[in-house]
Image: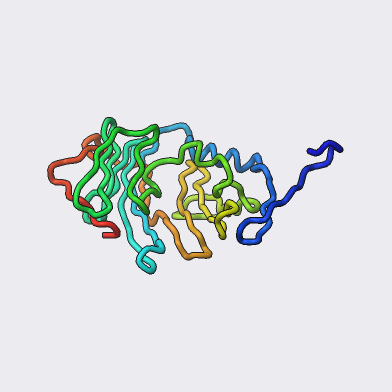
């Protein structure tokens, strides 16, 4: 509000010439963001397959498998070779050249997966929804269904230094992001198969002697 009690509606121009009003996030989206971060109050236990299309190499489509229990995660190619494992005490992540693994201590919500394999392997931290980097909806959520699940489809405004919005599809019951896309560029990550009650024993979340290093986009 300004000194006259009127709403401050200052507008700035982005590098792309588009007005970028300084607006706060609506209350309904704050609730959605909390559900995305915290889930429904029970530990995640999911397994499924993700399909993705990215801009690398002129446009690449690939799939990978995710098994996740809470903050523990295993991400592999469909043939079982390993991209990333987040265990209780160690995180193993393949190097970009696919020759060996790097091992490190877990972070607050696991270590980062290799580039283009982040989707699905962990829930977002609360910090993901701070600031202006695809954190504010452009309009109301739209009811939809995805993989037989009731969901919201939400478009997120880009920050001033990025040209196009992002679209996410969020499971209404669990807060799981089912699809994340940039329609303008034709890129996306999405679940194409999802089991919400799989058997996920502890040994999945450690590197085993027989495990092979995955090839990027393999």
In the rendered view, tell whether residue 166 sits above or below residue 37: below
Tell me, yes or no, if residue 102 can be seen here.
yes
> Taking 106 as reference, is 99 left or right?
left
In the image, residue 180 sits, relative to residue 206, either above or below, namely below
Q: Position of residue 25 (x, y in %)?
A: 64, 43
Instruction: Locate residue 111, reporting x and y percent.
Output: 34, 39
| Residue found at x 56% / y 60% | 163
Residue extending furthest toward the right = 4
The residue positioned farthest toward the left in the image shown: 209
Furthest-bottom residue in view? Answer: 58
For the N terminus, give its image quadrant: top right
Quarter of the image with the C terminus in it: bottom left
In this figure, what is the number of numbered marks?
0
Give residue 73's quadrant in the image.
Answer: top left
Q: Left or right: where does residue 94 sit relative to residue 160?
A: left
Residue 156 in view (yes/no): no
Foreground residue, 113 or 46?
A: 113
Residue name at image x 46 percent, y 37 percent:
125
Instruction: Estimate the x, y position of residue 131 in percent, counting from the top left.
Output: 57, 42
- Where is 31 relative to 149, above or below? above
- Seen from the viewer's position, the closer of residues 100 and 41 is 100
Q: Report which quarter residue 155 is drawn in.
A: bottom right
Q: Position of residue 9 (x, y in %)?
A: 76, 47
Q: Nearer the viewer, residue 141 or 151?
A: 141
Quarter of the rendering containing residue 61: bottom left
Q: Residue at x 27, y 42 (%)?
A: 85
Query: Which residue occupies 48% across, 50% down?
Result: 149
């Amino acid at each position: 509000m300004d000194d006259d009690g009127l709403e401050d509606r200052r507008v700035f121009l982005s590098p792309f010439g588009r007005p970028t009003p300084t607006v706060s996030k609506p209350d309904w989206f704050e609730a959605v963001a909390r559900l995305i971060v915290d889930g429904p109050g029970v530990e995640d236990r999911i397994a499924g397959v993700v399909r993705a299309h990215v801009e690398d190499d002129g446009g690449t489509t690939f799939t990978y498998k995710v098994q996740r229990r809470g903050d523990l995660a295993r991400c592999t190619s469909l043939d079982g070779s390993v991209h990333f494992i987040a265990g209780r005490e160690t995180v193993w992540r393949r190097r970009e050249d696919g020759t060996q693994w790097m091992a490190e201590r877990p972070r607050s919500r696991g270590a980062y997966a290799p580039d283009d394999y982040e989707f699905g392997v962990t829930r977002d931290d609360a910090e993901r929804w701070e600031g202006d980097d695809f954190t504010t909806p452009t309009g109301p959520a739209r009811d939809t269904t995805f993989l037989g699940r009731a969901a919201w489809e939400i478009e997120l405004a880009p920050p001033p230094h990025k040209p196009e919005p992002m679209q996410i599809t969020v499971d209404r019951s669990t807060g799981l992001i089912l699809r994340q896309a940039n329609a303008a560029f034709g890129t996306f990550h999405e679940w194409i198969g999802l089991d919400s009650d799989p058997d996920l024993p502890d040994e999945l979340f450690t590197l085993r002697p027989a495990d092979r290093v995955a090839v990027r986009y393999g």
